[in-house]
Amino acid sequence: MTGPLLAPAALSYCGQRMTAYRHMWRSSLVSTVVEPALFLAAMGLTLGVLVDRGTGLPGGVSYLAFLAPGLLAATAMQNAGFESTYPVLGAIKWDKTYEAVLATPARSIDVLTGHLLYVLFRVTTSVVLFVLVMILFGAAQSPLLLLAVPAAVLTGMAFAAPITAFAARQDNDTGFAALQRFLILPMFLFSGTFFPVSQLPTVLEWVAYATPLWHGVSLARGLALGTIGPGAAVLHVGYLALWVGAGVWLAARSFRRRLVT
Amino acid sequence: MHSEAAPDRIAAIQSDGALIRARGLVKRFGDFTAVDGIDVDVAPGESFGFLGPNGAGKSSTMRMIGAVSPPTAGELRILGLDPAVDGPAIRARLGVVPQTDNLDLEITVAENLLVYGRYFGLPRATLRTRAAELLDFVQLTDRATAKVEPLSGGMKRRLTIARALINDPDVVLLDEPTTGLDPQARHVLWERLYRLKQRGVTLVLTTHYMDEAEQLCDRLVVMDKGRIAAEGSPAQLIRTWSTREVCELRFPLVEGQPGPERFVPDLAPVLERGAVERIEALPDRLLLYAEDGDAALMAVTAAGVHPLSSLVRRSSLEDVFLRLTGRTLVD
């Protein structure tokens, strides 16, 4: 079963998902942007004013400038997480679309890489769109914010791959609610998106350092604020890439075990 | 890739007549043996069926033939190729209609065909022409731009068949093609499949409907508990395993009393005189196997047994199955 990792069949599967996306992009566009925009407005424009008037942030950065790139990375995580849970289990179990694809020359690895390509597309479009919204509403205080886009996309993929592996091992969707409640949401709140993790008790601070989201947020924020050094950047990128790689490896195993029986 | 070597091997296997060849094919899932050592040969242009009840191992066999499920043991060659080595090359030349429809519900009827054809590396222009032809063939042209979800069961089935034909396959695998459809939709489907057969497409199908097997199969195997119980054309199977006619007798069912089998001892003279070869007692009726059903019925009356109602009919594959396994096909 050797062959290229990215075979034409993977592009065909990505194309199949894009065909479906063409039917629903309007509604999905709104939902992918509205939620992070609400957080940006609620936290950035209101709470942020209080923060800026108070003790402020390290380096004298405005709260909005601090929040925007972090929220971008966290949004990428949320979108990648959603796209890699219900649609994956649905295609395995409910609609059996993977079964249909595997009856063609496509292999299980092609379905996986095609799926991840589509998630890459979805995460990228949602992040770019969110940046445009930020610019439109004056929340982007520096053009450097654009550098946070690839960092956020990488963050998204660091979640997409392992969550896909997890989804492919589920029998029903109860695990997804637990994933959202006990991992995604706590990470969203405590991995440095809204405040520096140095505010946390020491033990939790170290837990935060281990999360891919903290690395994603730090990378995106460091690039957007122009404060990141090459060493830190390489560390963050390397750590996120590790999650992507390990996730793809695990997901390839899960797909093979689940789909080739 | 292994596909370069494929044409020679296909030519080799076709010269000796088998598109599909299985020897001692086994499929196990943990401790459960779904397919327990079967031998199968399917020739080009043939309509070949696996007849058996649910759980007989038909779908597991089909998935192995479809090169999506690796055999646990035994030898399997499809189009002369080994599915363990040349899975993608084999699947490129198959059309698959699975037991439950697995259409993409998020896209339109026509898109289901166009998108699917891309996996076979077919150019978009070719696909557009072919999709239009296939939609016409399965009578769904007026639904081309509709979503799949609201289609009726029969329409979804027809679309699945059209999708299976998008790559102009050498062999079409149909797993329970008409299960769950109403009689009218079944007849429409049979008629379309018959046309395919006439075009020379090799059909391999599973079914637990004897009428479907009789309508569509040139040759079939009767499967039970993972094994092949008998093989032949529908007519051969009936000749070998049943009598020409069957006389069905129904009796009043009395609560708390044994069923129709209570009349079997009374029918002993009928068997002795040779008017009936064999009697099968079902919970609701007796089946009397005889060359001449009317003569059998007269002998029954002469023996002093008076059923509530009687029916004389030709033997069917249902009778073959009952004889081979002691059970009915559809419980």
Image (cartoon, coloured by chain):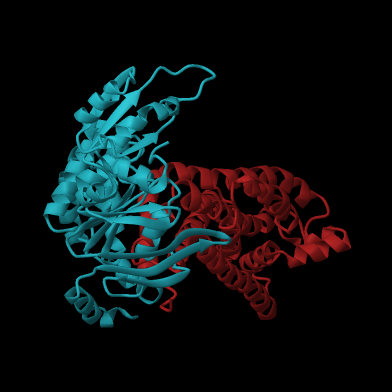
Chain colours: A red, B cyan
The image quarter in which residue A227 lies: bottom right
Of A83 and B200, the residue lying toward us: B200
Q: Position of residue A197 (x, y in %)?
A: 79, 60
Image-based side of A157 in relation to A201, left or right: left
* Count of numbered marks: 0
Name the quadrant of the N terminus of chain B: bottom left
Taking the spot 41% from the left edge, 29% from the top edge, the residue there is B265
Q: Is residue B151 visible?
A: no
Residue B236 vs B246, above or below: the answer is below
Q: Position of residue B47 (x, y in %)?
A: 21, 55
Q: Is residue B173 visible?
A: yes
Image-based side of A52 in relation to A18, left or right: right
Residue A247 vs B52, above or below: the answer is below
Taking the spot 54% from the left edge, 55% from the top edge, the residue there is A84
Residue A132 vs B252, above or below: the answer is below
Q: Position of residue B303 (x, y in %)?
A: 31, 23
Image-based side of A107 in relation to B177, left or right: right
